[in-house]
Image (cartoon, grey):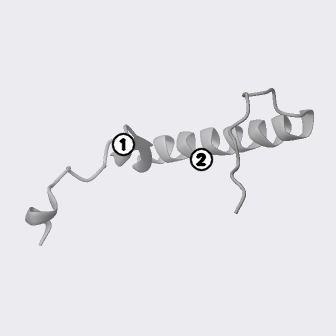
Amino acid sequence: MSRIEPTEPREPSPDTQRMLDSLTKAVHDALEQKRRLGQYAVIWRDGRPVAIGGDAPNEQSPETNQ
């Protein structure tokens, strides 16, 4: 089995950049809509999912969630 070596980071192609821009805008718009509606959202922060927003559930350990 051949091994894939990491490559140097490079600029995305124009098509790839347009896709990334579209995805970034879609996520921004969805989070903004949730904020306006008073809904919480779950995002990834520091290697774990975190609920953000005014009505986000309180953080509890799994043992107290039973």
Side of 33 relative to 17 (left or right): left
Q: Which mark is residue 52?
A: 1
Residue 40 x, y percent position in the rendering: 39, 49
Q: Which residue is mark 2?
A: 30
Q: Secondary structure at mark 2?
A: helix
Residue 63 sits above or below residue 42 on the image: below
- Residue found farthest to the right: 14
Q: Residue at x 11, y 73 (%)?
A: 66
- Residue found farthest to the left: 64
Residue 7 x, y percent position in the rendering: 73, 34
Quarter location, residue 54: top left
Q: Residue at x 14, y 66 (%)?
A: 65
Q: Residue at x 72, y 28 (%)?
A: 9
Q: Are marks 2 and 1 in contact (CB under 8 Å)?
A: no
Side of 34 relative to 26 (left or right): left
From mark 2 to mark 1, how far is it between C-alphas? 13 Å
Quarter location, residue 53: top left
In this orientation, which residue lies closer to the viewer: 36 or 52?
Answer: 52
Side of 65 relative to 39 (left or right): left
Residue 58 x, y percent position in the rendering: 20, 50
Tally of marks: 2
Kind of residue sitting beneath label 2: Ala
Q: Secondary structure at mark 1?
A: strand
Work out whether mark 2 precedes mark 1 in sequence or the reverse, and give the earlier one. 2
Q: Quadrant of the N terminus?
A: bottom right
| Few, some or many residues within 10 Å of mark 1 (<14, 14–19, 20+) | some
Residue 60 sits above or below residue 63 on the image: above
Kind of residue sitting beneath label 1: Ile
| Few, some or many residues within 10 Å of mark 2 (<14, 14–19, 20+) | few
